[in-house]
Amino acid sequence: MTYDETLAYLHSLQQFGFKPGLESTRRLAALVGNPQERLRFIHVAGTNGKGSVCALLDAIYRVAGRRVGLYTSPHLIRFGERIRVQGDPIPDDALARLTEVVRAAAESATPPLEPTFFEFTTVLALLWFTECQVDLVIWETGLGGRFDATNIVTPLASVVTQIGLDHMAVLGPTIGHIASEKAGIFKPGVPALTSATDPDALAILEFKAREIGAPFLPVGPSAVTHFHFDLALLGEHQRWNGALAAATIRTLRFLLPVSDDEMARGFATVRWPGRLQVVRRGNRILLLDGAHNRDGITALRAALERHFPSQAPVLVLGMLADKEWKEMARTLAPLASRIITTPVASVRTVPPADLKAACLASGVTRPVRVTASLAEALKGCAADPFVLVTGSLYLIGEALELLEEGAAAGPERALNEWTPPTRPGGA
């Protein structure tokens, strides 16, 4: 398969949407030799912060001399960002070759398997990490935990970040429902760590851990207060993620030794694009943040007040319709000097005119301009000294394409699309 043929095939898998459950992933992994049985994992779930925790763990273990695989989603620009070894995305030729291997395995089954996009790429990632002989895989869930395709592994530690209201159509209508789904990654005898602070979430996570005999290790405000490492990532919320990563590393030191000096260097050098990412263009600052739910927007607002006090940015805003976009727009609008609404390159985009109406409903008197594309929006604020682009990781991926020469990969961003399923056991 050529790389273009590989992308076309991966696009075709989206017709199967998102199907919660592990049977298909287990069968597909078995057909390629169960590569997960030859790997060690740290499994990370949560609503907000799981990608950041994964990036921190990856950076620190690499500083400590480990050969590390990293599996995350979604990607910002190119698909290969999801599957990394030592920070390097899977090469195009390796992706094409392994796509053929996994495709042939699926078609050889009786009856043939029809894996979803995420099931397929999860097994493909396992093959690549095995081929690269990594020491450790930092393994992020796609959605939820209990029925997530990544949950076919038995990790060294199960880690749950902050839990909030997101993907309710899939995971359930309350924090309790969502916490129960995230706790599905806990395994008997495997340390279960969490930085969740919501009382209902914390109680359910602890109950689920005790129920199966998983040592439960909450990382609370005291751990954050005593987190004294310099952190390359902006925002107070990243200190919570840093404290959780540090607790995970200390818990596993008997298996994977890491010194405090190595931790410090990892924290100081970590990169995680699209999360309060500062892009400088001369004297101008563009702040790119993929906040896409209520808690993410709250963290963004707090970071603006802390790191950019008394500076009102031009707000470039694009959001997806399956999020709480009206409330998020009302939260952000008062912070802006003016607002530009734009579509996200997704079938799920909120029309920019509707976003304008939501911003105005907050009572702001700032100008609100509607644009037909992000390129038009960025052109409209090209002379402004401080610009904030936010509302969706998909929007941030497009922004990075437009801002970074040679990064264009629009068709690959479309691989982030998925069809929301019905919750297991009911709507």
Image (tube, rainbow, N blue to C red):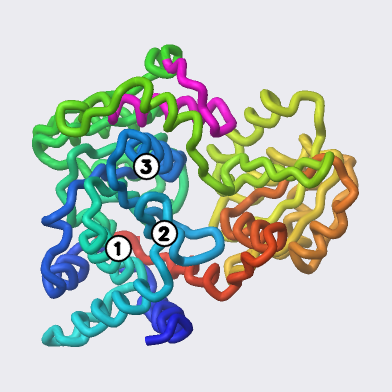
Q: Residue at x 26, y 24 (%)?
A: 250
Residue 125 bears which disc, if any?
Answer: 1
Looking at the rendering, which quadrant does residue 60 occupy? top left
Q: Residues within 10 Å of mark 2 (few under 14, many from 20)?
A: some
Relative to 206, 38 lies left or right: left
Majority SS type along the magenta span: helix
Q: Which residue is mark 3?
A: 58
Q: What residue range appears in magenta?
A: 227-249
Q: Which amino acid type is marked by label 3?
A: Asp
Q: Which amino acid type is marked by label 2?
A: Arg
**Does residue 330 lie above or below 111 as drawn?**
above
Q: Which residue is mark 2?
A: 82
> For the residue labelled by badge 1, is the local secondary structure a helix, a strand or a loop?
helix
> For the residue labelled by badge 2, is the local secondary structure a helix, a strand or a loop?
helix
- Mark found first going from the N terminus, 2 or 1: 2
Relative to 292, 44 lies left or right: left
